[in-house]
Image (cartoon, rainbow, N blue to C red):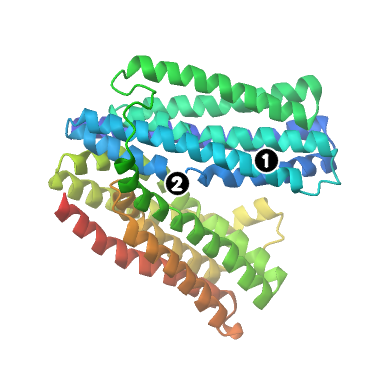
């Protein structure tokens, strides 16, 4: 258990470094870009970079499923089969990303871009699309490190690559001050980072050569169904986030929507914080399932859930106690403090913390297909409940509708986790 605790803590630190990189990029990018561009030009840049952001789903979940299978097979010392999974994923991700790149470039060519210089804008978008697709290969670097029990090291390298990519874009901005140059800087830095990481991985883990000689179509068939089911999670997220915003805005008006989104963002902070912790459990769950260690699986689930609930409860109490001050500072007193509404939001967030470890248990073992279906259905029930909610119930009714989602997922995840542990 001491070894697992050490790896989890190392993974927690690595995930935290990723959050710091993300926050740093978000906070520093805005003032730096506005130092060289007008607000209008920066807005145009955001429009150009919006489409490539959606291409993070282009691997269709194959990378995640392959990563889990590699860790589980490695835990059973079935290195030959683990290598086959890796090379099959490499082949398919290469094929899929090439297809997406060609289709995306065709779409970019057809888009009306009158507000930009069309030639520069299309070339810029093409490079941003290629950067987004190349980022998918980070999942394969992560998979190799996880399989070898070096999850934290892999995450640190991926975060360094993200930081290097961003610095490359800033270099293009500082030198040439054009959108084309920023995209070219991103692309050049990403390509260099990929070459370096690939050579490091190949040298450190010779059991996983970066070739296609052992790719297998039967392995692909086994991975395809659980991979595609992963898409239900982002679809469900889109329904619960954007869908609820649309319902609140059309039912209660824009003022209520501003309050709703602000309170939802504030109340989700504990859930986001715990995501960093739960991701550190992921490789240990995969490894324990592959080794058939039911006792360890139960321990990880029970202790992980207990820690999550305690941490979430403390965070929710702190947010509620300081909310009046936080809202004043954050929104310049434009959003009022509504104790009842915030308490309901925090209660919903606590419900989300209660089943989050269960979701990780299932996704880390590729046993998530039923949860994915229920996740999407629960999102539909939640949004449908919000639509049917009497308008006189106001924001309180909308938050109650959000709570339906958490309750359904809590009950479902507990039942599915119990079945998964029995199958280990």
Left/right placement of residue 350 relative to residue 6 reads: right
> Is label 1 in a helix, a strand or a loop?
helix
Residue 273 is marked as 2
Which residue is painted at 29% across and 32% down in the image?
84
Residue topped by disc 1: 105
**In the image: residue 420, left or right of residue 180:** left
Tell me which residue sits at (58%, 25%) in the image: 190
Q: Is residue 129 left or right of residue 69?
A: right
Count every numbered label the image shows and give the total: 2
Q: Quadrant of residue 243?
A: bottom right
Whether residue 358 is visible to the viewer of this picture, yes or no, is yes
Where in the figure is residue 176, as x and y percent of width and height?
Answer: 80, 22
Q: Earlier in the sequence, mark 1 or mark 2?
A: 1
Q: Is residue 105 above or below residue 134?
A: below
Distance between mark 1 and mark 2 Cα atoms: 37 Å
Q: Horizontal and vertical percent for residue 294?
A: 14, 47
Within the image, what quadrant is residue 349 found in? Answer: bottom left
Please give left or right for residue 309 compared with residue 266 in the image.
Answer: left
């Amino acid at each position: 258990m001491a070894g697992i605790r050490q790896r989890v803590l190392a993974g927690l630190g690595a995930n935290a470094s990723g959050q710091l990189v993300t926050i740093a990029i978000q906070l520093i990018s805005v003032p730096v870009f506005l130092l060289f561009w007008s607000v209008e030009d920066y807005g145009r840049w955001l429009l150009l970079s919006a489409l490539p952001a959606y291409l993070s789903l282009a691997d269709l979940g194959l990378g995640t499923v392959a990563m889990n299978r590699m860790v589980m097979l490695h835990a059973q010392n079935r290195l030959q089969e683990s290598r086959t999974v890796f090379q099959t994923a490499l082949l398919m991700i290469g094929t899929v990303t090439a297809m997406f790149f060609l289709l995306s470039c065709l779409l970019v060519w057809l888009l009306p871009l009158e507000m930009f210089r069309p030639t520069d804008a299309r070339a810029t978008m093409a490079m941003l699309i290629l950067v987004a697709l190349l980022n998918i290969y980070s999942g394969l670097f992560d998979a190799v490190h996880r399989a070898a029990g070096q999850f934290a090291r892999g995450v640190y390298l991926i975060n360094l690559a993200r930081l290097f990519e961003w610095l490359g874009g800033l270099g293009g901005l500082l030198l040439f001050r054009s959108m084309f140059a920023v995209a070219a800087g991103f692309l050049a830095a990403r390509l260099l980072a990929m070459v370096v990481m690939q050579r490091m991985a190949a040298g450190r883990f010779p059991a996983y050569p970066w070739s296609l000689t052992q790719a297998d179509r039967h392995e692909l068939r086994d991975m395809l169904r659980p991979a595609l089911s992963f898409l239900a999670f982002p679809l469900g997220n889109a329904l619960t986030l954007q869908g609820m915003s649309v319902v609140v805005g059309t039912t209660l008006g824009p003022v209520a929507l501003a309050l709703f989104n602000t309170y939802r963002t504030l109340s989700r902070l504990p859930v986001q914080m715990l995501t960093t912790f739960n991701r550190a459990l992921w490789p240990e769950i995969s490894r324990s399932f592959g080794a058939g260690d039911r006792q360890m699986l139960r321990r990880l689930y029970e202790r992980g859930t207990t820690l999550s609930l305690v941490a979430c409860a403390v965070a929710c109490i702190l947010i509620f106690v300081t909310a009046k001050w936080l809202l004043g500072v954050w929104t310049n007193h434009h959003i009022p403090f509504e104790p009842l509404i915030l308490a309901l939001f925090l209660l919903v967030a606590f419900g989300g913390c209660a089943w989050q470890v269960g979701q990780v248990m299932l996704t880390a073992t590729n046993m998530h297909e039923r949860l994915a279906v229920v996740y999407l259905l629960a999102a539909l029930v939640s949004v449908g409940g919000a639509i049917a909610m009497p308008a006189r119930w106001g924001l309180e009714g909308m938050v109650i509708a959000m709570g339906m989602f958490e309750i359904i997922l809590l009950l479902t995840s507990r039942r599915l986790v119990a079945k998964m542990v029995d199958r280990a």
